[in-house]
Image: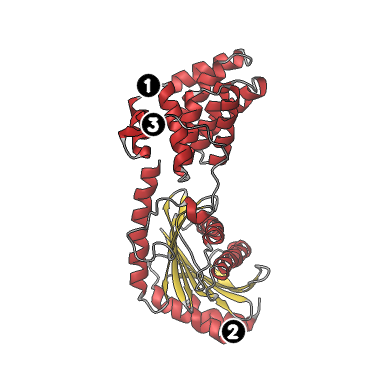
Amino acid sequence: MAEEIRALSAQYAADPSSLVFLRLGEVLRAHGQTDSALKVVLQGLSRYPHLPEAHDLHARILVDQRDFAGAFDEWDMVLRLVPHHVGAHKGIGFLYYRAGEMDRALYHLRAAAELDPEDAGLHAAVERVAGGEEIWETPMPEAPTDQAPHRPAADRRVDNPFADLPGGSDGLLLADQNGLPLGGGSRTLEGEDVSEQAAAALASIAREAARAARLLAMGEWSHLSVECADVSACILNPTADSTLLAVIDAGTPGGQLAFVADRAAKSARAWLERQR
Amino acid sequence: MSAGFEELLEGLTHMRGVKGALLVSAEDGIPVSGALVEEEQAPALAALAATLLARVRDLTTQTGHEAPRFLHLQAADGLLLLAPASNELIVVGVAGREALIGPLRLEMLRIAERLH
């Protein structure tokens, strides 16, 4: 793989106006070098702003980087250029599915499946989203008006990683490194959903904790316990790119907080693995 | 650094595993008093401790809970402890893995109470 990257990089350097940037971007992405892949595809797009395959590659890199809104815009651009682009329909279908917008997801996945009847996996995905094989008998509906999947946090969390745990919807919250809620939830005593605010604060806390551990040469931080008069909380990173908040009543023994947090971290890791 | 504050921290600095203790102004993150094994770390640590506490206060405010009274950051090779005192000072403790968290927590809460 490294050899291929070197060869493609040399070709691209020799002729920056060639389309070899598409192959180079693909290989870098396949190799997990998404930042380099992004740089290459953006350079290519600056020369070929109307090349559908470049926008499609850009979208897939953005999905790897969890920039789903950006990916949607890129695939939307592809469909404006080529309305029957299989990859763009698949990509947008995936984004709608992820956001829980099943009708729109089904439309785009089915459009992709009809354009690529050989893709058995895609056909199975359509049937799974439709809830049965009879989908192929019904006529294709009209194209929906596409809007980037954006819903309130509580609705976006289609699949709760803590569904089976006590406090899974208000005492356990999983956030990504950008401070966006991924699962679980946080509510005030009055019942107000403050998951988005809490997730944003969690990302900042994780950054500060890492800085403090680095300054003191204490190695990786494992958790931050917070004691308030009314609650106790534990903050930890189930994975390198996520942060978990577990909150329990102050009267509960400290050992139980650690137990709850560890259990939630395990569930979060398994859930994140399933999402990838 | 203030001699009165240093006396207050003295018990803490002699506890098992403790590498240093600081009193920090919560508002501007400046060390007010204390002693760290690596003293040149004090200004940076004070600033980080104040920022970390401010971020945790943001979280507890946004989630409708009371202000934090004790923080324990556990890392592979040591721990950082913060006990905010109500007059905008933070008691900061740095300790190695061999430290006993229970007695340290009690001592830091006692100091914070005295600063109240």
Give the quarter of the figure containing the N terminus of chain A.
Answer: top left
| Number of the front mark, 2 or 1 | 1
Q: Amino acid at mark 3?
A: Thr
Name the secondary structure under disc 3.
loop
Tell me the residue at 58%/16% (across/down). A12
Q: Is B29 positioned to the left or the right of A117 in the image?
A: right
Give the residue number, with chain letter if any, for mark 2: B115
The picture quadrant where one finds residue A17 is top right
Within 10 angstroms of label 1, few (less than 14), some, or many (20 or more) residues? few
Q: Which residue is disc 1 drawn over? A: A117
Inter-mark Cα distance, 2 to 1: 74 Å
User: Picture quarter containing residue A52?
Assistant: top right
- Which residue has dot 3 on it? A138
Q: Position of residue A87 (x, y in %)?
A: 48, 26
Question: Is residue A194 shown to the viewer in this render?
Answer: yes
State the image coordinates of residue A54 (x, y, percent, origin top left): 57, 23
Q: CA distance from mark 3 to mark 1?
A: 16 Å
User: Hey, what amino acid is under mark 1?
Assistant: Pro
